[in-house]
Amino acid sequence: MTMAVTATSVRQPGFARRWTQGAQGSAAQVGCTISGPRRTAPRAARSGARVVRRQRYGFSVVAHGGVATGSSRAGASEWATAPEWAAANNVVPLDAPIKAPSVHQVDFLVIGSGIAGLSYALKVAEFGSVAVVTKAEAQEGCTQYAQGGVCAVLDPLDSVESHVRDTFVAGCFLNNLGAVEAVCREGPERVLELAAMGAAFTASVDGSLHLTREGGHSHRRIVHAADVTGREIERALLANARSHPNITFHEHHLAVDLVLAEVGGAQQCLGVDVLDQKAGNMARFVAPVTMLATGGAGQVYPYTTNPGVTTGDGMAMAARGKAAMANMEFVQFHPTGIYGAGCLITEGSRGEGGVLRNSEGDRFMERYAPT
């Protein structure tokens, strides 16, 4: 086994030198060669070596057949073969054999594991096998960070017509009538369905669902779980989905692009190509039905309350695949987002009478969205 190691550290040049000297003794034992930072990379390149790079304690490690890790406490070195080091550090060496992409075939493919993706997965799982592909842990996404609650007409003094009217006013009458009516009409049934799945919503003294109020609503119609409603909904949906025999989860799998082909003279989506981020391998998921439930793209903005996974992957794949897309300009600006903190004051505070004032005590939002 031959090896070339570069030990460099901008912050601790002295330690880098000591570490290189300490590693020299080990090199003699395992037949490695160690050279300075100016010669190592060119030498490795000239020898045609496949390179593994890992930043650890400020060192750049360039290896032929193995890798080195340094201990800053002891100033010593430990040597390991590339596969051993990669397994210990969850890194795939670049000289590892390239594996052919694995192929998974299911009846329904769902990209995303928030409230939309999980709800859909549970519905279609009654008709076939379902694969849920998600690029982080399944619970990570906008759903679990939603605070205030879910709108549903459950108060006898409220009405679907009132809910529809409030929604149109809040949407400056740009709303899609069919969509608004469907959401307002079916809302109560969907909320009760979540409760039946085990979502523990906050209850009133008499045992009924407690209803609060948010901005834009003329009645109390917000069902909530304290102030962590999204987290509770995600927990309940995940528990049900994980226990369903027809649903499998593929976490830390990043959807790269749609698999498209011409069928019967028309372009069809046949699945998705996916990167297994832990194994470093590509996989192809093939399905007659693919649902993109990937959430938004809040991370394109310097300041956002969205989690790090909201990078618009699904939107980009859909655009490249020539899918029909609409209303992309509608991105929510949340007036109670806390600047630079990545969090917000719950919408429920406004429904309970809270108002926004600036440092001068003025209700500044009246200038932008008059009540």
Image (cartoon, grey):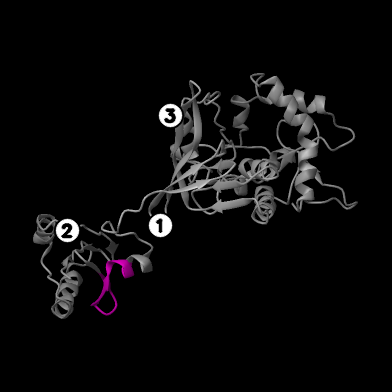
Tell me the residue that label 2 is attached to.
49
Give the Cα separation between the discs numbered 2 and 1: 22 Å
Give the Cα separation between the discs numbered 3 and 2: 37 Å
* Circle 2 SS class: loop
Using residue 62 as the reference point, say whether residue 86 is left or right of it.
right
* Circle 3 SS class: helix
Tell me the residue that label 1 is attached to.
279
The segment highlighted magenta reads: 68-85
What x and y, as percent, mark residue 32? Answer: 15, 72
- Residue at left 49%, top 46%? 309
Give the crowd class for mark 2: few <14, some 14-19, many >=20 residues within 10 Å. some
Foreground residue among 164 and 102: 102
What x and y, as percent, mark residue 41? Answer: 14, 58
| In the depicted structure, whether residue 207 falls above or below residue 184 | below
The three-letter code of the residue at mark 2 reads Ala
Q: Which image quadrant for residue 371?
A: top right
Foreground residue among 79 and 200: 79
Inspect the magenta stretch and tell me whether residue 118 lies in it: no
Can residue 247 be seen? yes
The three-letter code of the residue at mark 3 reads Arg
Tell me the residue that label 3 is attached to.
320
What x and y, as percent, mark residue 194? Answer: 75, 46
